[in-house]
Amino acid sequence: MAFPFLAVAMVASAGISAVAQKRAGDSAALASEQQADQMEIDRSANELKAMQVQNTLLGDYNFASATNDAQFSFMLGGGESTSVDAFKRAQREIFIDDIKAAQLQSSLESSNMTVAALLERQRGTNARTVGKINALSTLVGAGADIYKTF
């Protein structure tokens, strides 16, 4: 009489354990997917911030250029000077270098966030796979135990 009860108990225990292991893997995979989605949202927000910084730099450059033009025009009595032209060219090159540096930094940060999100998704996939393997291993082990016992 103990045989059927013990076998049923072993099967039930193994089944519950296998289901729990699979659900743990699925839960970890879901958490990783949500984390990866958040990383992509953060990446998009960082790209917007980078554009805002570039727009601010452009606004500052245009304001400074207009102010300098007005001051130089007043000082020179409305005439132009080669030194003023050289100054403007140098300022323009500095501005272009600043924009290039900001774009490069934004691009690198965006790439890093993309890679991090991909790695997080892979971590989730791995956790789901491990959960399935552990569940299957539990069931096979329980089957072997039942076979040895009876």
Image (cartoon, rainbow, N blue to C red):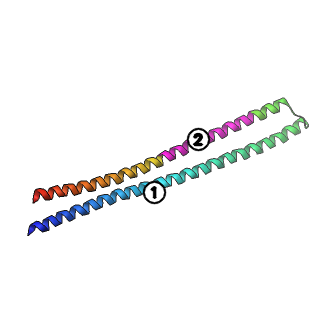
Q: For the point 86% across and 31% down, which residue is it?
A: 81
Q: Secondary structure at mark 2?
A: helix
**Horizontal and vertical percent for residue 60?**
73, 45
- The single residue placed furthest to the left in the displayed view is 1
Instruction: State the extent of the magenta-drawn residues as a range.
Output: 90-115
Residue at the image position 74 percent from the left and 36 percent from the top: 91
97 is within the stretch colored magenta:
yes
Judge left or right: residue 110 versus residue 141: right
Quadrant that contains the C terminus: bottom left
Mark before the other along the chain sequence, 1 or 2:
1
Figure check: 147 above or below 75: below
Foreground pick, 93 / 120: 120
Classified by dominant secondary structure, the portion drawn in magenta counts as: helix
Answer few, some or many: residues within 10 Å of disc 2's Cα (few below 14, many 20 plus, some between 14 and 19). Answer: few
Residue 86 position, x and y percent, is 79, 31
In the image, is residue 54 part of the stretch drawn in magenta?
no
* Mark 1 neighbour class, 10 Å CA radius: few under 14, some 14 to 19, many 20 or more: some
Q: Which residue is mark 2?
A: 105
In front: 105, or 131?
131
Q: Is residue 53 left or right of residue 79?
A: left
**Residue beneath disc 1:** 34
Above or below residue 52? Residue 104 is above
Local secondary structure at mark 1: helix
